[in-house]
Amino acid sequence: MSLTTPAPSPTIAAARPAAAKKARQASRRAGVPYAFLAPGLLLFTLFLAAPIVYAGYLSLRKVKVSGLGLGAKSRTEVWAGFSNYVRSMTDPEFLPSVYRILGYGLIVVPTMLGLALLMALLLDANRTRPWIGSFTRIAIFLPYAVPAVVASLLWGFLYLPRVSPITDVLEAFGLTAPELLSSSWVLWAVANVAIWGGTGFNMIVIYTALKAVPTSLYESARIDGASELAIAWRIKIPIVMPSLVMTFVFSLIATLQVFAEPMTLKPLSNTISFTWTPLMKVYRDAFVRNDIYSAAATSVVIALATFLLSFGFLKLVGRRAFNQED
């Protein structure tokens, strides 16, 4: 007696190719997002991740000079450990630059975010006149479109007493114009450029969050007898708190990396040195002293400080601002 295997039914035989085809289509669809992300990931790797890794590598190396340093093999790159970090942190010009950045941040961040929030609230309160809102948004945002170098040059022209029209106006009223690039005022002068340029961007971010709030919520509050000030304080500001947190983090990062404004104003005043900010110190070490290893160590320290401060602030206020739960 022989055993024979029954042939598969026509329905099952037809279903197998269809299932395989669906599996291939699903696999292709799953790969589509990665295909769109690939150019961005490639650029991120080449121009951001790889330089960070290379800077970390350079910060642990140094050049060893043999003999008089004149031969082809007289200068060799060797392992340095953390000596570059020690040399960078013990530099007598490093801590003063950090203190200047702290003072700069205390001036710029609260003032810029306060003005941005105030302007966003004023624009949102005037929703019934869209033409006013459109013109005002463009006027406030326009300074952000001006590059930092150009803005610094424009303000530097206004800061110089001999060429500034502000000096002529003050003298016409019998007033003496202050030396805005002197040692007493230069920190405020640099901070003013950053505030003028960055307020518009932060205002747009906050105003966009306010535009997403339905007007029925405000109308209900007005029916209950709430004033415009009470609506702004008890409804609008809590709603835009995530946007405020985000703009604060952006402003904090920009403060730690300030470079363009003081570097552009430096030729106009002898009160701004090559190490006025930590990032300017990195520039001096790398391109003036040709010490890329110390510059890499300082840049790694700045990057770590930026990450720790941003992450710490988000952990501190994230749960309340973003309604996070354990």
Image (cartoon, rainbow, N blue to C red):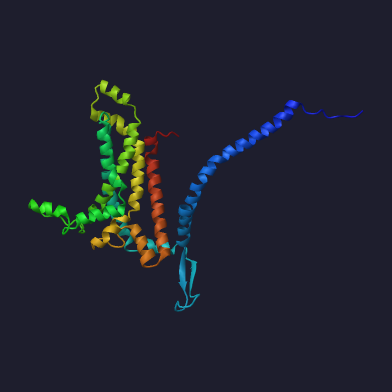
**Residue 95: quadrant of the picture:** bottom left
Q: Residue at x 60, y 35 (%)?
A: 26
Query: What is the quadrant of the C terminus in the image?
Result: top left
Q: Nearer the viewer, residue 84 or 196?
A: 196
Note whether 200 is above or below 289 in the view shown.
above
Residue 196: x, y in percent? 26, 47
Q: Residue at x 31, y 57 (%)?
A: 277
Note whether 164 is above or below 122 in the view shown.
below
Note whether 50 is above or below 11 in the view shown.
below
**Residue 226: quadrant of the picture:** top left
Is residue 62 shown to the viewer in this render? yes
Residue 130: x, y in percent? 27, 32
Residue 103: x, y in percent? 27, 52
Q: Residue at x 24, y 22 (%)?
A: 225
Residue 48: x, y in percent? 45, 53
Q: Residue furthest right?
A: 1
Q: Residue furthest top?
A: 223
Q: Residue at x 17, y 58 (%)?
A: 163
Q: Residue furthest left?
A: 174
- 35 vs 184, left or right, is right
Query: What is the quadrant of the N terminus in the image?
Result: top right
Q: Nearer the viewer, residue 74 or 192?
A: 192
